[in-house]
Amino acid sequence: MSKTVDARGLSCPQPVLEALNAIAAMSSGTLVVLVDTEASKENVCRAVEAKGWTLDSVSEDRGEYRIAISKG
Protein backbone atom coordinates (compact mmCIF):
# COMPACT_ATOMS: atom_id res chain seq x y z
CA MET A 1 0.00 0.00 0.00
CA SER A 2 1.26 3.47 -0.85
CA LYS A 3 0.01 6.79 0.45
CA THR A 4 1.01 10.43 -0.07
CA VAL A 5 0.81 13.27 2.45
CA ASP A 6 1.06 16.73 0.90
CA ALA A 7 2.36 18.94 3.71
CA ARG A 8 3.59 21.75 1.46
CA GLY A 9 2.68 25.15 2.83
CA LEU A 10 2.30 23.88 6.40
CA SER A 11 4.43 25.22 9.25
CA CYS A 12 6.28 22.97 11.67
CA PRO A 13 5.34 20.90 13.53
CA GLN A 14 2.33 20.19 11.28
CA PRO A 15 4.25 18.29 8.54
CA VAL A 16 5.81 16.02 11.17
CA LEU A 17 2.46 15.36 12.85
CA GLU A 18 0.75 14.63 9.51
CA ALA A 19 3.52 12.21 8.51
CA LEU A 20 3.60 10.41 11.86
CA ASN A 21 -0.19 10.06 11.99
CA ALA A 22 -0.36 8.74 8.43
CA ILE A 23 2.36 6.13 8.85
CA ALA A 24 1.12 5.07 12.29
CA ALA A 25 -2.27 4.30 10.69
CA MET A 26 -0.62 2.03 8.09
CA SER A 27 0.08 -1.62 8.83
CA SER A 28 2.77 -1.70 6.14
CA GLY A 29 3.70 0.01 2.90
CA THR A 30 5.22 3.22 1.66
CA LEU A 31 4.40 6.78 2.63
CA VAL A 32 5.54 9.72 0.51
CA VAL A 33 5.63 13.07 2.29
CA LEU A 34 5.86 16.30 0.30
CA VAL A 35 7.24 19.39 2.08
CA ASP A 36 8.55 22.73 0.91
CA THR A 37 11.06 23.83 3.54
CA GLU A 38 14.45 22.50 4.60
CA ALA A 39 13.34 22.60 8.25
CA SER A 40 10.27 20.46 7.55
CA LYS A 41 12.37 17.96 5.60
CA GLU A 42 14.90 17.65 8.43
CA ASN A 43 12.20 17.37 11.11
CA VAL A 44 10.22 14.70 9.24
CA CYS A 45 13.38 12.67 8.58
CA ARG A 46 14.47 12.93 12.22
CA ALA A 47 11.03 11.89 13.50
CA VAL A 48 10.85 8.91 11.12
CA GLU A 49 14.26 7.66 12.19
CA ALA A 50 13.39 8.15 15.88
CA LYS A 51 10.32 5.93 15.41
CA GLY A 52 12.45 3.23 13.78
CA TRP A 53 10.79 3.38 10.36
CA THR A 54 12.85 3.18 7.17
CA LEU A 55 13.77 6.37 5.35
CA ASP A 56 13.97 5.12 1.75
CA SER A 57 14.84 8.32 -0.06
CA VAL A 58 14.84 12.09 0.08
CA SER A 59 14.88 14.12 -3.11
CA GLU A 60 14.68 17.83 -3.85
CA ASP A 61 13.27 19.55 -6.91
CA ARG A 62 13.01 23.34 -7.11
CA GLY A 63 12.77 23.81 -3.36
CA GLU A 64 10.27 21.03 -2.76
CA TYR A 65 11.22 17.80 -1.01
CA ARG A 66 9.89 14.27 -1.49
CA ILE A 67 10.48 11.94 1.44
CA ALA A 68 9.77 8.22 0.98
CA ILE A 69 9.23 6.17 4.13
CA SER A 70 8.63 2.41 4.53
CA LYS A 71 6.87 0.58 7.30
CA GLY A 72 6.59 -3.15 7.81
Image (cartoon, grey):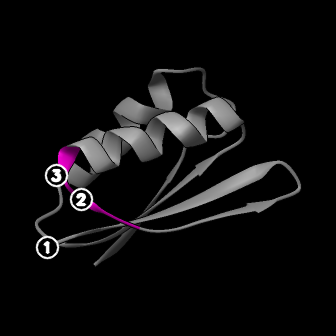
Q: Residue at x 20, y 45 (%)?
A: 51
Which dot marks residue 72?
Answer: 1
Q: Residue at x 66, y 40 (%)?
A: 8
Q: Nearer the viewer, residue 10 or 64?
A: 64
Which dot marks residue 25?
Answer: 3
| Amino acid carrying mark 3 in the image | Ala
Q: Is residue 35 left or right of residue 36?
A: left
| Amino acid carrying mark 1 in the image | Gly
Q: Earlier in the sequence, mark 3 or mark 2?
A: 3
Name the residue beneath numbered marker 2: 53
Q: Nearer the viewer, residue 42 or 36?
A: 42
Q: Is residue 59 left or right of residue 14?
A: right
Distance in Å between CA atoms under marks 1 and 2: 8 Å
Q: Is residue 17 left or right of residue 7?
A: left
- Give the quarter of the figure containing the N terminus: bottom left
Question: Mark 2 falls on what kind of element?
Answer: loop
- Give the quarter of the figure containing the C terminus: bottom left
